[in-house]
Image (cartoon, rainbow, N blue to C red):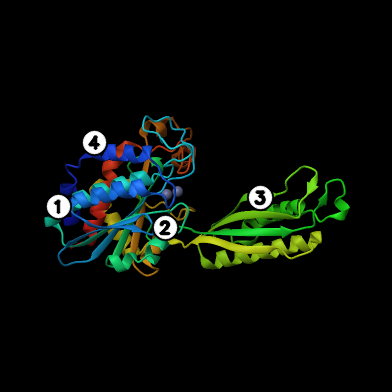
Amino acid sequence: MTSAPARTALDLTADLPVPDLEDFYRDLHRHPELSFEEHRTAARLAERLKAAGFETAEGIAGTGVAGLLRNGDGPTVLLRADMDALPVEELTGLPYASESPGVMHACGHDLHVTWLAGAAKALADGRDAWSGTLLLVGQPAEEAGGGAAAMVADGLYDRVPRPDVLLGQHVVPGPAGLYAHVPGLIMSATTDVEIVVHGRGGHGSRPETTVDPVVTAAYIVTRLQTIVSREIKPRESAVLTVGRIEAGTAPNIIPATARISLNLRTQSEAVRDRMIAAIRRIAEGECHAAGCPREPEVTLGGSFPATVNDPETDHRIAAVHREVFGTATVFDSGPAMASEDFSKLALGELPYSYWFVTSTPAETWEAAPGADLMEKFDAVPSNHSPHFAPDLSTVAPGVRTLVSGALACLV
Ligand SMILES: [Zn+2]
Ligand SMILES: [Zn+2]
């Protein structure tokens, strides 16, 4: 037997304006905007929220949008979509590809905004069927980090009520039409670290008069690879990636400094602390070994906390998704190494559920090499790829996930 929220969700989304939502999606996809520059996207979303009957607050942290619909007694449920695009040159060849050179919705946040706009209308049109308050948030700058925290710092919860529960979703690769729920840790914490190696510069022909920071940086980069393989328990998951090395200006000059930028992904505070301590130890040790005139500088940059679903909330949302889409479509993907700032909207204390919606077009999935799901998963374009192209067939289901999730939390 179907529960009341699932039945209501199917009713409220039976006649979604799919062609209109697809047009909206294609328009957003053509006009991607980088973090904190989402002016056009925010205005388009706010228009739709207002048209659906929401009061809106705009310009939160620059481009953030909040839409509020009070509809009697009951809990306040926050639905969130991030709005920003990436500095990626689109190579999909789609007829609605980006018209902004070097900028692309390569993470699918345009689809997130479309889903949110569709859910806003469906839930507002069906307000006789539920009671409570809906709070819809269009968030800037998930990619560059800091968008969620900036909205909170700019008084989001002074302008609109604090939610009792928060829901968010992300498009991911995988055969379109699956919903990944994890009743706990679903995404990792991320931490950026910067290392500056101080050597002594000089002529490339007279290394004996210098301390070469390039060679020292190379040792550091190599030795950093032993942190995950030799210092972290095999059953813990962690990633350390050196994403940037900068040093020097010419082939025949030994520079005075070298800079290493790296990123960590961790699933517990203890592992993060241990890795940061190891990075400091290795940087200092290699600089001592090279005879550097000064200690290296090791500084922590941006970080997101881990995304940890409230088990009770996530079980409830997963259950309604099973009813709406079929039992076989909902699965536990386990924690991902990706990171998100969604949890910042939850202030470290409010319960939330965050899930993934797979969106690889059927023909792309079929054509991908690989014998099983995981091999194909690794072969199809992932988020941030210049070829990332979610299937339009996921426009309506992504509205249904939000509508049914919201109804499972409202009364
Ligand atoms: Zn992304
Ligand atoms: Zn994303």
Residue designated by label 3: 245
Q: Residue at x 34, y 41 (%)?
A: 28
Rendered image: mark on residue 147: 2
Instruction: Say what amino acid the circle numbered 2 marks.
Output: Gly
Q: Earlier in the sequence, mark 1 or mark 3?
A: 1
Circle 3/circle 2 CB separation < 8 Å: no
Q: Earlier in the sequence, mark 3 or mark 2?
A: 2
Circle 1/circle 2 CB separation < 8 Å: no
Rendered location of residue 119, percent (x, y): 24, 50
Q: Residues within 10 Å of mark 1 (few under 14, many from 20)?
A: some
Left or right position of 302 against 47? right
Separation of marks 4 and 2 at Cα, in angstroms: 30 Å
Q: Earlier in the sequence, mark 1 or mark 4?
A: 4
Q: Quadrant of residue 223?
A: bottom right
Given residues 288 and 53, the one toward you in this image is 53
Left or right position of 36 against 252? left
Question: Looking at mark 2, is its residue's CB closer than 8 Å to ligand 2?
Answer: no
Above or below 106: residue 341: below
Q: Residue at x 32, y 48 (%)?
A: 113
Q: Residue at x 41, y 42 (%)?
A: 105
SS of the residue under disc 3: strand
Question: Looking at mark 1, is its residue's CB closer than 8 Å to ligand 2?
Answer: no
Rendered image: mark on residue 19: 4
Given residues 148 and 101, the one toward you in this image is 101
SS of the residue under disc 4: helix
